[in-house]
């Protein structure tokens, strides 16, 4: 199947390799064009680690070509460029196309639904709670750390869910767990809470540009903070009446370690050689993406359902103070969606049905 991947980072390259290995036909689009230049010049993409493959990916010269040439679009970009990417692709999307957001953040699926409804387009929007693979990009190489065993998924509109799981399974194998709609997926991206604890507790290492093991430094104190943050997320899910996986399930299913406490599982990942490295800069997406687009969205949902996420809110305040900037104003998706003026019932309806086409 022809799949256009919007993005040219670690997740985009690793997912392209997964698709190519499975016999599909991925095309890559880099927003600036820089990420795909070597492929246009004939270099192969080389995947190493959990996927070993060398292949020549197709490259889209612009986002219109990426959309026109594909049955399925897959957004593999940090949340801080989701709005501009959605604004760029939405005018080209046709009836019946499918857009997958990996990983979904800040109710972006609802913003895209509004853009498409305004054009009278009926497309299926699939939101994944996280990415298929984890890893990094190095020039034309994808270093794939893991291919996740299970993936949470929901669609906008919700009535397309069975068809969407079938499509995802055809492309990516039998690993999809259908969740209770988009609001469950909005609470299924665990990066923001995990990265809050990891980045906050290791901020000086990041600021100094040190090389440090990530899982190795999920010490008992960091693990306890992650588990406390998890309780807040689970309380919001319970107030919404949706089921989401726990952070322990997340680590066990993503990194293939036996279920245990968060710190213990991270120490096991480290021993397995899968612990990865933490950010070497304070200007990492762990903060620049996950605070404004992740923590702010979770905190907003918490207030909406009367289950305030006080540790998440404290995390936002601490990062704002440490960085001397107001991260809560850096989220461009929630204001564009009109989140401030939506009641809980309106949000639930929008998540279930998508934006109305008039
Ligand atoms: N890597 C991982 O293991 C995991 C990643 N995720 C999530 O997946 C998503 C993608 O992650 P990953 O691939 O690692 O990210 P990368 O940082 O590697 O993404 C690089 C891509 O983002 C584009 N980009 C960066 N900044 C901008 C900007 N300001 N405007 C437009 N485009 C920009 C780059 O564009 P260009 O091509 O023009 O340079 C490039 O295509 C993120 O949301 C991340 O949080 C979630 C779990 C695991
Ligand atoms: C490293 C990893 C897999 C865990 O924090 C991740 O989620 C990321 O890079 O965004």
Image (cartoon, rainbow, N blue to C red):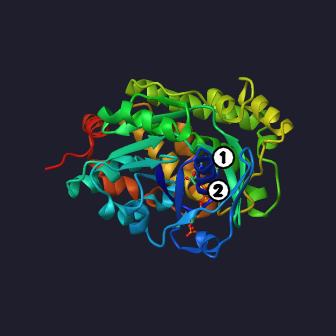
Q: Answer with left or right where residue 189 lies relative to residue 195.
A: left
Local packing at callout 1 (Cα closer than 10 Å; few below 14, some 14-19, many 20+) is many
160, above or below 27, in the image: above
The residue drawn where x is 47% and y is 53% is 2
Query: What is the number of the mark on residue 142?
Result: none
Q: Answer with left or right where residue 358 lies relative to residue 342.
A: left
Q: Position of residue 243 (x, y in %)?
A: 46, 24
Mark 1 C-beta to ligand 1 under 8 Å: yes
Q: Position of residue 160 (x, y in %)?
A: 32, 35
The residue drawn where x is 51% and y is 33% is 152
Q: Which residue is mark 2?
A: 10
Q: Position of residue 149 (x, y in %)?
A: 63, 32
Q: Is residue 313 visible?
A: yes
Q: Nearer the viewer, residue 194 or 202?
A: 194
Local packing at callout 2 (Cα closer than 10 Å; few below 14, some 14-19, many 20+) is many
Q: Answer with left or right where residue 137 lies relative to residue 83.
A: right
Mark 2 C-beta to ligand 1 under 8 Å: yes
Q: Quadrant of residue 184?
A: top left
Q: Nearer the viewer, residue 277 or 324?
A: 277
Q: Earlier in the sequence, mark 2 or mark 1?
A: 2
Extreme residue in the left direction: 358
Q: Nearer the viewer, residue 208 or 139?
A: 139
The residue drawn where x is 45% and y is 37% is 185
Q: Is residue 77 visible?
A: no
Q: Quadrant of residue 125?
A: top left
Labels 2 & 1 near each other (Cβ < 8 A) = yes
Q: Position of residue 240 (x, y in %)?
A: 38, 28
Q: Which residue is mark 1?
A: 134
Q: Secondary structure at mark 2?
A: helix
The CA distance from mark 2 to mark 1 is 8 Å
């Amino acid at each position: 199947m022809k799949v256009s991947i919007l993005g040219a980072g670690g997740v985009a390259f690793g997912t392209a390799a997964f698709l190519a290995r499975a016999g599909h036909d991925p095309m890559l689009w880099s927003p600036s064009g820089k990420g795909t230049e070597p492929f246009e010049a004939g270099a192969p993409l080389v995947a190493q680690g959990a996927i070993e493959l060398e292949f020549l990916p197709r490259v889209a010269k612009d986002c219109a070509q990426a959309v026109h040439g594909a049955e399925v679009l897959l957004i593999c970009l940090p949340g801080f460029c989701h709005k501009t990417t959605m604004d760029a692709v939405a005018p080209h999307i046709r009836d019946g196309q499918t857009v997958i957001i990996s990983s979904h953040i800040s109710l972006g699926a609802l913003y895209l639904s509004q853009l498409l409804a305004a054009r009278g387009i009926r497309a299926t929007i699939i939101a994944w709670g996280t990415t298929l693979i984890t890893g990094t990009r190095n020039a034309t190489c994808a270093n794939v750390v893991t291919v996740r065993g299970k993936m949470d998924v929901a669609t906008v509109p919700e009535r397309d869910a069975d068809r969407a799981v079938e499509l995802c399974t055809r492309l990516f194998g039998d690993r999809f767990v259908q969740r209770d709609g988009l609001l469950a997926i909005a609470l299924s991206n665990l990066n923001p809470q995990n990265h809050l604890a990891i980045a906050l507790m290791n901020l000086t290492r990041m600021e100094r540009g040190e090389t440090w093991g990530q899982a190795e430094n999920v010490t008992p104190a960091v693990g306890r903070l992650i588990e406390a943050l998890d309780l807040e997320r689970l309380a919001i899910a319970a107030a919404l009446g949706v089921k989401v996986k726990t952070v322990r399930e997340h680590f066990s299913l993503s990194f293939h370690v036996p279920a245990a406490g968060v710190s213990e599982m991270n120490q096991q990942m480290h021993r397995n050689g899968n612990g990865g490295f933490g950010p070497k800069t304070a200007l990492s997406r762990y903060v620049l993406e996950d605070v404004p687009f992740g923590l702010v969205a979770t905190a907003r949902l918490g207030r909406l359902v009367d289950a305030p996420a006080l540790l998440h809110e404290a995390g936002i305040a601490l990062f704002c103070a440490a960085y001397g900037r107001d991260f809560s104003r850096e989220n461009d998706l929630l204001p564009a969606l009109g989140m401030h003026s939506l009641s809980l019932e309106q949000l639930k309806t929008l998540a279930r049905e998508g934006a109305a086409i008039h």
